[in-house]
Image (spheres, rainbow, N blue to C red):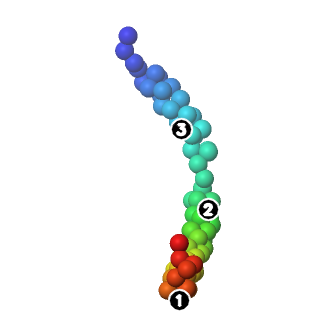
Amino acid sequence: MSLNQKDFDQIEELLDEKLEEKIKILPTKDELFSKMDEVMGELKIIREEQTTLSYTVSNHENRLKNLEDIHPEIAP
């Protein structure tokens, strides 16, 4: 049994319906860009906080080292 044009049309219609169902759940371009802007904003804040915390930890390490040099009895 071979396929005829009617069979191909039905297959195409079925595939189109399935594709439409799958595409419905995808966000629109505006929704995607809006969410990406939000995520990138949060990432920027996290990176800035990490830089600040890194500096603070480094500063504390230096202060502790200076204290240990001045008072060797407190060194671990």
Q: How far across and down, in percent of the image, does residue 8 sit?
A: 44, 26
Q: Quadrant of the N terminus?
A: top left
Identify the element where label 3 is drawn. helix
Contact, CB < 8 Å: mark 1 with mark 3?
no
User: Mark 2 vs mark 3: which is more N-terminal?
Assistant: 3
**Observer-nearest residue: 63 or 4?**
63
Q: Residue at x 39, y 18 (%)?
A: 3
Asked whether 13 or 57 is in front, the reply is 57
**Tag 3: residue type?**
Leu
Question: First in sequence: mark 1 or mark 3?
Answer: 3
Question: Would you say the residues marked 1 and 2 are in contact, meaning their CB atoms lie under 8 Å apart?
Answer: no
Q: Which residue in the rendered view is the most extreme toward the top?
A: 1
Q: Label 1, label 3: how many angstroms apart (C-alpha)?
A: 73 Å
Q: Is residue 5 above or below residue 56?
A: above
Residue 44 at least partly seen: no
Q: Looking at the picture, which amino acid does disc 2 mark?
A: Lys
Disc 1 packing (10 Å; few <14; some 14–19; many ≥20)? few
Q: Residue at x 60, y 38 (%)?
A: 21
Secondary structure at numbered mark 2 = helix
What residue is disc 2 on?
Answer: 35
Query: What residue does disc 1 label?
Result: 70
Q: Position of residue 60 (x, y in %)?
A: 57, 81
| Residue 19: image tag | 3
What residue occupies the far left of the structure in this picture?
A: 2
First reached walking from the N terminus: tag 1 or tag 2: 2
Query: What percent of the width, then of the height, locates residue 41?
Result: 60, 71
